[in-house]
Image (cartoon, rainbow, N blue to C red):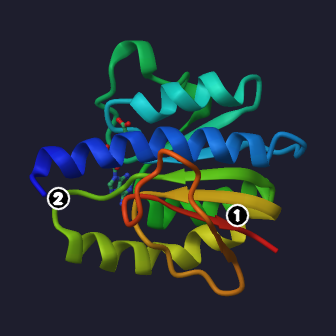
Amino acid sequence: MSRLDIFIDRMVSQRAGLEHAAGLVAGMNGPAFELGLGNGRTYDHMRKVLAPRDIYVFERAVASHPDSTPPDDMLILGDVFETLPLALDRFGPVAALVHADLGGHNPAKNDAFARAISPYVQPLLAPGGVMVASDRMYFEGFEELPLPEGAVAERCFIYRAP
Ligand code: SAM
């Protein structure tokens, strides 16, 4: 596969995964968390499919398109290893949906990062809450859900908290 193939698979999987997860959590209260704003494309799609749910965005350095930049009060700036524990203190285990796209171009580094960040993400999810990730996560006791039509295996992972 070319890098373009892999990139396209990731994009279509993010869209399919987020739309599927939005349906799964439609009956739940609680905010959504976007981990890794980047250009803001997935954040913008989350706004579309999750409205009017609150979406808090975690990012260490904002460089998003102006049309997809969250308001200051919904932005949690800093390294996620520091800000996720603070978010747990602030909100408790209430997130209905967490989306993570924190990786770069190195699969081994992405896997190590996902392994390290998993225990920081797991306690944020409400019972029944759903996580959509571009990398395999390492949760204990969460169910890995089948992918929806349109998502590509290994480019998207969906988990649900018990
Ligand atoms: N999904 C985004 C979009 O649609 O535009 C792209 C996200 S981009 C691949 C990854 C983002 O995660 C980058 O903006 C990067 O700054 C952020 N990031 C990576 N590691 C981070 C960390 N430890 N703490 C906070 N943000 C981080």
Is label 2 or label 1 in front? 2
| Left or right of residue 91: residue 19 | left
Q: Please give the name of the residue rendered at 55% of the width and 50% of the height, measured from the top-left corner.
A: 99
The spot of residue 141 in percent (x, y) is: 71, 85
The spot of residue 125 in percent (x, y) is: 73, 63
Quadrant hosting residue 121: bottom right
Secondary-structure class at tag 2: loop
| Residue closer to the observer: 157 or 125 | 157
- The answer to whether marks 2 and 1 mark residues whose Cβ atoms lie closer than 8 Å is no
| Left or right of residue 18: residue 128 | right
The spot of residue 130 in percent (x, y) is: 70, 58
* Image: 70 above or below 147: above
Q: Please give the name of the residue rendered at 23% of the width and 46% of the height, measured from the top-left corner.
A: 7
The spot of residue 134 in percent (x, y) is: 41, 58
Residue 124: image tag:
1
Q: What residue type is labelled 2?
A: His
Indicate which disc, 2 or 1, sits on the residue closer to the N terminus. 2
Secondary-structure class at tag 1: helix
Q: Please give the name of the residue rendered at 62% of the width and 53% of the height, measured from the top-left corner.
A: 98
Q: Residue furthest front?
A: 149
> For the residue carrying disc 1, how many other residues have a C-alpha within 10 Å: few (<14), some (14-19), or many (20+)?
many
Residue 105: image tag:
2
